Amino acid sequence: MVLYSSAPIQRLVGVAFIDRIEECDFENLWILADANGGGVTYDELKAYVKGKRTAFGVMIERVKIAEVQVNPKDIFPNFTPPQSFLYLGPSDFPRVMCAMFPSQAPV
């Protein structure tokens, strides 16, 4: 998962490697968030999933910080910041990785 930092930075700043996706009810999601540093309070999470029977938790294995913070418009000229997420096409991910990690790009 490519990480984008919103204003004022507005750059691609790293990659999160996903361990697994957990599907569960609110109480079990809170247990996961509380145990793993979910970044939200109990009340924030409860308000976010209000009215839903099922919730999903993205369990991050590790995060790799970009060598170079990349302006997404340099790769995607029509880029507009996503409100939540944006799918990358099969050829997009390697281009993004080469831009963020130039020392590891294939020669």
Image (spheres, rainbow, N blue to C red):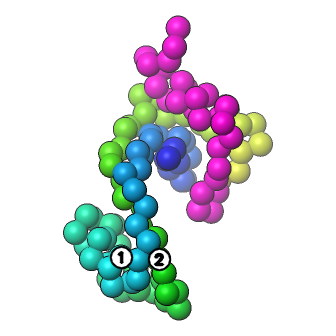
Q: Which residues are magenta?
A: 82-107
Residue 2 in the figure: left or right of residue 44: right
Earlier sequence position, callout 1 versus callout 2: 1
The mark found on residue 55 in the picture is 2
Q: Is residue 11 above or below residue 21?
A: above
SS under mark 2: strand
Are the residues at dot 1 and dot 2 in contact (C-beta closer than 8 Å)? yes
Residue at 44 percent of width and 19 percent of height: 104
Residue 62 in the figure: left or right of residue 79: left
Residue 45 in the figure: left or right of residue 30: right
Which residue occupies the foreground of this view, 78 or 42?
42
Q: Is residue 86 above or below residue 94?
A: below
Residue 50: x %, y % from top left:
49, 89
For label 2, the crowd category at 10 Å Cα-Cα, with few meaning under 14, some 14 to 19 and many 20 or more, is: some
Residue at 68 percent of width and 40 percent of height: 89
- Can the viewer see residue 73? no
Residue at 38 percent of width and 37 percent of height: 65
For label 1, the crowd category at 10 Å Cα-Cα, with few meaning under 14, some 14 to 19 and many 20 or more, is: many
* Residue 32: quadrant of the picture: bottom left
Task: Identify residue for label 1.
Answer: 29
Residue 8: say if magenta.
no
